[in-house]
Image (cartoon, rainbow, N blue to C red):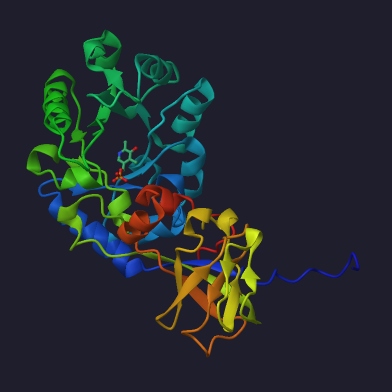
Amino acid sequence: MQADTPVPPAPAAPLRLTLDPAALAANWRALDRLSGAARAGAAVKADGYGTGAQRAVRVLADAGCRDFFVANWSEAAPLLDLVDPASIAVLHGPTTATEAAWARQSGLRPVLNSLAQAARWLESGGGPCHLMVDTGINRLGVPLAELDDPLLARLDIDILLSHLASADEDSPLNALQCQRWHAAQERLPHRRASLANSAGIALGADYHGALTRPGLALYGGVPCASLAGTIRPVVIPEAALLQTRMLQPGDSVGYNATYTASSALRVGVVALGYADGYLRCWSGRGTLRLAGQALPVLGRISMDMTVIDLSAAPEAREGDWISVDYELPTAARLSGLSQYELLTLLGTRFSRP
Ligand SMILES: *Cc1c(COP(=O)(O)O)cnc(C)c1O
């Protein structure tokens, strides 16, 4: 290669994660409506649950969403130019003085999770913030026993939030957490109260406060039966067909030869593997599609490749885009993975156009 020859752009990736912006917007609007008097925000942590946080935030902001939640500071950075930084809440809070200072410089809003984080925020100069109160999940959040600490009285709290442990099941913990969250609201001045995640929205008005925080259901996940008719699928993983080949009876496929053809069979090799999040649990179990035709996975999933049965798609040619059956509730049942894992597993080799 000559040093003075500019290298042209790289060829397109053989994997893409197609996003249906209309479905994402419709899911947000449906969850906003179901939130009653509350507004719906959006959890966009973990790169928008794997869908691509920047494009998700653009679509959600256009749909009317005004509150966004990420887990940590580095996730917030790529979103700073897209929406008002004050509308982005960082759930892990300021874990160091450096993070607290950066929050103030960037205009992002920290969620304070402990007295130590509250002290750190005030020492950095303070300003509007959110406060997470633990009502029973025992993960992050200020314990109820510490709510009268004078340090908290010095905070300028916008959102007073808590998080449900079992919103996706019928558990007595839901009502208990709801009651504790209402009691906490009496003890600390704040502008908006927030409790419900996706499944929590379906629990009813007591759980809504001023702001709800759906994540999973925005992206097509269905955490509880009552949302089943409302939520639309949002993402479709697709990969290129790299090669087609003929198997003869007795030929086996892939590592450890776990599939053996009993008759002559045309198969395809697709550029998708467990390194892309299509895990080995799909071996002999997953379905891919071309023009609606079902193409079953044969044998083991490899790191970068999956072999499929092309019997139903004789027209399939190398270079075709093959889609993956990934409707989340069904995929979770078939794979044993959670709907959250199915989304956030999808790897960095997917382009997210
Ligand atoms: C992830 C998260 C949400 C969103 O939860 P879903 O179950 O995906 O709707 C809401 N609030 C907090 C604090 C979270 O960490």
Residue 168 rendering spot, x and y as whole percentages: 22, 43
Could you say which quadrant of the image residue 173 lies in? top left
View extreme (right): residue: 2
Where ligand 1 lies, by image quadrant?
Answer: top left
* Residue 337 left/right relative to 171: right
Q: Which is nearer the eye, 5 or 291? A: 291
Residue 223 rendering spot, x and y as whole percentages: 25, 50
Could you say which quadrant of the image residue 291 lies in? bottom left
View extreme (bottom): residue: 315
Q: Which is nearer the eye, 274 or 10? A: 274
Q: Quadrant of the N terminus?
A: bottom right
Identify the residue at image location x=13%, y=38%.
207
* Residue 139 left/right relative to 9: left
Residue 91 rendering spot, x and y as whole percentages: 38, 34
Identify the residue at image location x=47%, y=51%.
81
Question: Against 248, is 184 above or below?
Answer: above
Residue 173 in view in this figure: yes
The total of numbered circles placed on residues is 0
Question: Against 330, is 36 above or below?
Answer: above
Residue 12 in view in this figure: no
* Residue 273 left/right relative to 105: right
Identify the residue at image location x=24%, y=15%.
153
* Residue 53 left/right relative to 86: right
Identify the residue at image location x=51%, y=58%.
278
Q: Which is nearer the eye, 115 or 257? A: 257
Residue 176 rendering spot, x and y as whole percentages: 13, 26
